Amino acid sequence: MAASCGVYDENAALLVAAERGRVGCVLGVVDEGLSRNESSGTTVAALTVAAQRGHVGYVRALLTAAAAVGAAGAAAAEEDEDGWTALHWAAHWGHAACARALLDAGADPRAARARDGWTPLHVASWRGHLPNVRVLLAAGADAEATARGGGGSGGVVDGGSGWRPLHCAARGGHCACAGELLRAGADPTRRAANGARPVDVAAGEDVRRVLLEAEDAAAAAPGRNKAHETMRKEKYM
């Protein structure tokens, strides 16, 4: 059956099928006896490729195959050599259906890359993928997750230590994502390690206005007025 994908090696067939989104190929390979226990690295690589390409049918098929050997959750949670899970990649490329399939299989919406603490929500917010932001928040992603470094797939943010998803949405100028994060409880006044608030790193007047309005609303909360006035003075001095 692997030969039907044009590849006679079972591991290679999984990767080729992931690239092309050919669900029948992965089912055929599994029928021939390939399980995650025999080649977990290949399975995770195939899942990552499928999530990157947005092949949701293939993602579901591979997770179903992994579930047959009790490994769907583990496959969804494993990191690639860059430290990202398949859920990070689905968030990066904006494939909300793939993200939902991974979450349904047990992927952790709060999974943070070891080296910098970036979660899938940081990634989706940075890239401005609103459907992914919504899917992740609905699954329990932490709107206040704190990064420890620059993040991205190559350390894309200078001074990113202490950034939260709202910083990421602000820096990208993504108003809709910023609004969704604020409605989920993100605090617009929280500072990064270098002292920057989301509004301080915002790109574009529209997202700056959204964040300043959110700060004004936060100032109305008991005990917040003094801190808010201090921030205003710092910003406009």
Image: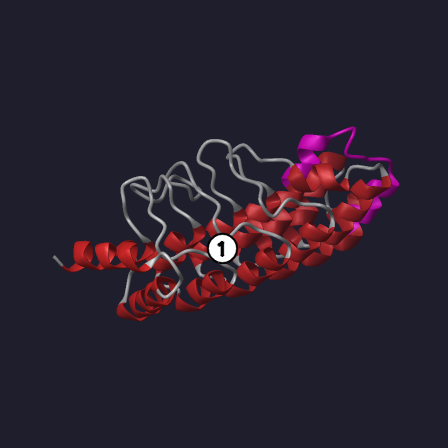
Q: Position of residue 48 (x, y in %)?
A: 61, 44
Residue at 31% in and 71% down:
206
- Secondary structure found at label 1: helix
Does the segment drawn in magenta span residue 35?
yes
Question: Does 219 appear above or below 31?
Answer: below
Q: Quadrant of the C terminus?
A: bottom left
Q: Nearer the viewer, residue 181 or 187?
A: 187
Mark 1 belongs to which amino acid?
A: Ala
Q: Is residue 166 visible?
A: yes
Q: Nearer the viewer, residue 228 or 126?
A: 228
Q: What residue is disc 1 on?
A: 124
Q: Position of residue 143 (x, y in %)?
A: 50, 53
Residue at 22% in and 54% down:
230
Please state if 137 lies on the left or on the right of 216 as rendered.
right
Q: Quadrant of the N terminus?
A: top right
The magenta stretch is 25-45
Does the magenta stretch mainly form a helix, a strand or a loop? Answer: helix
Q: Residue furthest top?
A: 38
Q: Position of residue 120 (x, y in %)?
A: 53, 48
Residue at 17% in and 57% down:
233
